[in-house]
Image (tube, helix red, strand yellow):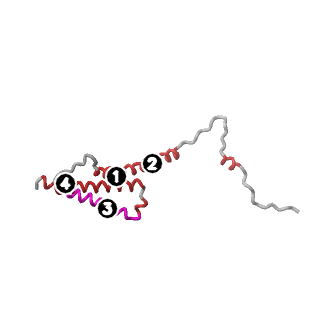
Amino acid sequence: MTDIHAGFWFFVAVTVVDLAGVIVIAAGLMRDEWRTYPSWHKVGLIIAALGLFFQAGRNLEFLLTGVSPSDADLPLWALKDLGISTVAVGYALIGIVAWRQRKAEEKAINQKPVRQQKGKASCSPRSKTALKKPPTTSVTRRRN
């Protein structure tokens, strides 16, 4: 097997994988669960599907003509990278926000109580109500 044949079969395999990715994303568009995805996730997957489609077209042009297409003006195949990056950045931002919230909650839990200043008695509203006597519920009888 020469290098030309190996390269040909590699491009065939990449083209098939690109088209399979487009089909999987298009099939996902038809599902009801698609509505529950975040909007940045949907946009990223649609952009990635377009990029995969253009990449498959570019590969087919090479396979049919044997000439590498010139796409220096508008490389639409780069959309697949942009779409995957959109999805990845979205999930990274969700992770960062969740991490910061968890750190803030841990800080609030581990925060030490403030010490009282000398000479000042501090009494919270709860402790004031705790000092009051509870009302009596027993009925007193009259003496005749």
Is residue 13 in the magenta section? yes
Q: Which residue is identified by label 1? A: 83
Label 2 residue SS: helix
Label 1 residue SS: helix
Q: CA distance from mark 4 to mark 1?
A: 24 Å
Relative to 26, is 3 above or below?
A: above
Please rate how many residues cluster around mark 2, counting C-alpha atoms within 10 Å: few if below 14, some from 14 to 19, many from 20. Answer: few
Relative to 89, is 120 above or below?
A: above
Query: CB atoms at circles 4 and 1 under 8 Å apart?
Result: no
Q: Amino acid at mark 1?
A: Gly
Q: Which residue is identified by label 4? A: 62
- Between 69 and 18, the residue placed more toward the observer is 69
The numbered mark, 3 or 4, whose residue comes first in the sequence reads 3
The residue range painted magenta reads 11-32
Q: CA distance from mark 1 to mark 2?
A: 21 Å
Q: CA distance from mark 2 to mark 3?
A: 30 Å
Label 3 residue SS: helix
Closest to the camera, between mark 4 and mark 1, is 4
The numbered mark, 1 or 3, whose residue comes first in the sequence reads 3
Closest to the camera, between mark 2 and mark 3, is 3
Is residue 7 in the magenta section? no
Q: Is residue 22 left or right of residue 142?
A: left
Which residue sits at x=72%, y=50%? 132
Q: Amino acid at mark 4?
A: Phe
Most common secondary structure along the magenta stretch: helix
Q: CA distance from mark 4 to mark 2?
A: 44 Å
Which mark, by number, is residue 97? 2
Which residue sits at x=33%, y=50%? 82
Q: Which residue is identified by label 3? A: 24
Q: Amino acid at mark 2?
A: Val
Q: Is residue 102 left or right of residue 125?
A: left
